[in-house]
Image (cartoon, rainbow, N blue to C red):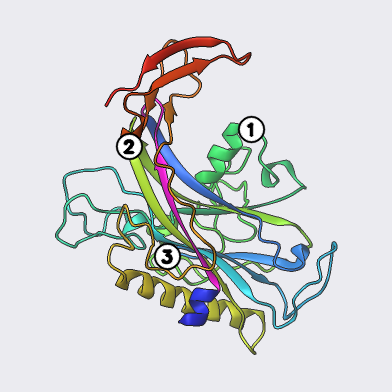
Amino acid sequence: EDLALAQTVFIHYKIINRSIQDLHDFRMGFFMDPDLGCANDDFLGTDVGRSMFYVYNWDDVDEPCLGALGYGPQPPAFGMAVLTGPRMDADGSDNINEPLVPAFNGSGFDDGTIDNERYGLCNTMQWNREGAFAVSDPSIPAHFHGFLRSQWKDGTPQTYGGIGYDLDTGAIASNFLYPDDSDPFGVGTNGVPQSSWHETQQQPQDRRGVASMGPITFAPGDEQEILIAYVYARATSGGALASVTALQHRVDSIATFAATIPGIMAPGSPCDALPLSIAQHAKNTTALHVYPIPANDHATIVTSNQGTGRTIQILDAHGSLVAQHPALG
């Protein structure tokens, strides 16, 4: 477990809607351009049950390329695992097993508590740095939003099998990319189980991907907190796929460890109980929070109690005083 922790990075995000608008169909996406040694021989995969998006080498030796040395024989695997996802919209119920996503890999379901359900991983998708339009880098907001929903740039849904892009109207839409055998109940294919699917075409490409969670309704002032683990594992033998197995075991260990720490999986936890290899930044108790940005005719400025009695001044880009107001307690 100590080695697993030493080779894991925990990131605790706190996301606040500082705007004055309700955000509907709001999704959180985590971009991954892994470049595991040589970037041209990487495969991506999804472990649906573990809420993990991961990368591994397509063969058992990672050769140097594009200026990267490569890992050589017995290359590692690397994954991003969702330990605590965003809260689902409240519905006044203790949900049991619906919807399938996130009941299969989320948390708070059928535990006797109302409206504490949280998402696990909901969608994963891959594209290439360059190449055919529909399956290459996004460039406009509609592309990014589509990728968060497993939809290609031309509006075609990601489909199950092959490379995930199929114009056949009979193709099966899939929320998850290359789930292998980690989705036995077909939660990513509308509840219809499918055969195992993993990447097989060894075509040199710089693969990129995104793992996303949602949708939620994000109202002004709402806060969401999530906990993500970035995990590394390298098996001592057995080839590249053995490193994937080692990664899965390590993620299980990390998730079990995190669940034993009081508050670690709950909103507001600062992860203080985790061993740190770098110093934490001290919280700035005099920080100002300004929203919305940009503002038109008004803006809200929030400061700490230490700001009480002081004067807040607003300057324009030239340094001229636009307005000033005493800070209120």
Q: Amino acid at mark 3?
A: Pro
Which stretch is magenta?
A: 7-22
Q: Which residue is mark 1?
A: 140
Q: Which residue is mark 3?
A: 193
User: Does the segment drawn in magenta span residue 19?
Assistant: yes
Instruction: Please indicate whether residue 302 sits to the left or right of residue 231 in the image.
Output: left
In the rendering, which numbered label is found on residue 73? none
Look at the numbered discs 3 and 1 and tell me whether their residues touch, using CB distance below 8 Å: no
User: Does the segment drawn in magenta span residue 140?
Assistant: no
Q: Is residue 64 above or below residue 210?
A: below
Q: Position of residue 177 (x, y in %)?
A: 55, 59
Per the image, label 1 sits on a secondary structure element best described as loop
Q: Which residue is mark 2?
A: 222
The front one of 158 and 231 is 231
Residue at mark 3 to residue at mark 1: CA–CA distance: 34 Å
Instruction: Please indicate whether residue 307 sits to the left or right of residue 321 in the image.
Output: left
Q: Nearer the viewer, mark 2 or mark 3?
A: 2
Residue lying at 60% horizontally and 48% vertically, measured from the top left? 168
Residue lying at 64% horizontally and 32% vertically, measured from the top left? 140
Residue at mark 2 to residue at mark 3: CA–CA distance: 36 Å
Badge 2 or badge 3: first in the primary sequence = 3
Picture quadrant where residue 139 is located:
top right
